[in-house]
Image (tube, helix red, strand yellow):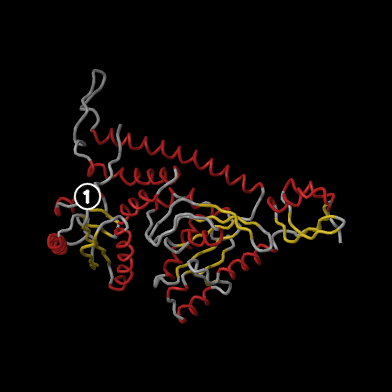
Amino acid sequence: MFEVKEKPRLVERAYLLACVHSEKDREEADSLLDELDELIRNLGIQIVGRKVIRIRKTSPRYMLGKGKVDEILDELKEVNADVMVFDNEISPAQQRNWENESKILVIDRHEVILDVFAERAQTKEAKLQVKLARLEYSLPRLRRAWTHLGRQRGGGVTQRGEGEAQIELDQRMLRDQISVTRKEIVQVSKQRQTGRSRRQRLPLPSVAIVGYTNAGKTTLLNTLTGANALSADKLFATLDPTSRRLRLPTGRVIVLTDTVGFIRKLPHRLVDSFKATLEEALVADLILHLVDLSNPEYEAQMDTTQKVLAELGASDNELVTVYNKVDRGGDEIEMLRAKKVGKDSVFISAQTGEGVPRLIDRLEEIFAGKREILKFLIPLSRYDLVARLRDQGELTNEETNDDGYTVLGSPRDGLIHALEEYKVFN
């Protein structure tokens, strides 16, 4: 059975390279290399060198000019690197040419992100999405991965000519795998939609937590709901969305969903592959855009998140910006700058709990006007209806007297009919 081979995990020493066309892009390139550095270290690989090079004209053979190529090759030998990683996307031909010259593994940022996603994926859906992205990425790179691709398969009695080259057979098998994987993802997405439909039948208000990777989304989910989802201080610590109920102080119940994080220069094939994971943001009543205020690049990260939301068609959803990690030394100037971005923003530390009560109050304010609060007088013998209102709707107040239970709340669907006869009209 044909399979796409992953690169061997024997590499230990990485050299990072970014190419820019203008000096004004150098600062951003350095920032992106910092991000790439962290991604690679999370894979257990040591960084032994890095460089930002300005190029006037892109070379189709190496991306760089011959003089710069020789300079980089000398540095690779000097630091004894066994993998070179381009922050820029490189073509399959450029990848082969660099490997022929350097005699080491050469990859780009996209392949690093694919490796990180593959390592982090836990659920069947996430694994399928990573598999699809890897298959699509590997299709134009088959010549690099296989040594038997030049062989011809001879024609049979009823065939003419030399027959198909092995690469054509492998490409066809790879396309078949892509087709099968897409169908599997559709099937798993239907199962997710079924689960979402069950939640919507209640229906409880839904809140999607979105933001740049490592902004603290899972930590916030755990802090608000008491969940124990995987949370770590590293990029893409988790890829699988987690939904938990949160009962607000007034009794209103909402569903919080932690989504996969965004990143600059995310491969488009991964955006497409992970739409099923990110589509929680599309159907959410509210989006919490979580921002890592301690990161000096937080404004660029905000732009990235907003652009991806726009690509997904979720830019029109109601959104609240939540600035996280205020405990990590965000000075007053940065705080003031951030406050000007959005007047309704909330400043918190998901780790310490600072500001979280204010966020909960903000959620109460937003959802208070989204449901009509009704008054009911329920007989003492029907406390089961009170319990159902608490679990399946929103119970905001409950009093017990001789006539029964006087409650204020918002019942859902079928429960409305069960409570109709006990409604109190003022």
* Residue 217 percent location from the top left of the image: 48, 61
Percent across and percent down for residue 124 are 44, 42
Compared with 421, 348 (above or below) is below
Quadrant location, the N terminus? top left
SS under mark 1: loop
Residue 366 placement (x, y as % from top left): 64, 65
In this rendered view, identify the residue nearer to me: 146 or 249: 249
- Total marks drawn? 1
Query: At x 85% / y 49%, what residue is drawn?
Result: 421
x%, y% of residue 354? 53, 71
363 up-or-down from 145: above or below: below
Residue drawn at the location 84% of the way across and 55% of the way down: 404
Q: Quadrant of the C terminus?
A: bottom right
Q: Residues within 10 Å of mark 1 (few under 14, many from 20)?
A: few
| Residue at far top of view | 157
Which amino acid type is shown beneath numbered disc 1?
Leu
Residue for point 38% across, 39% down: 178
Nearer to me, 59 or 13: 13
> Horizontal placement of 153 versus 281: left or right?
left
Q: Which residue is mark 1?
A: 10
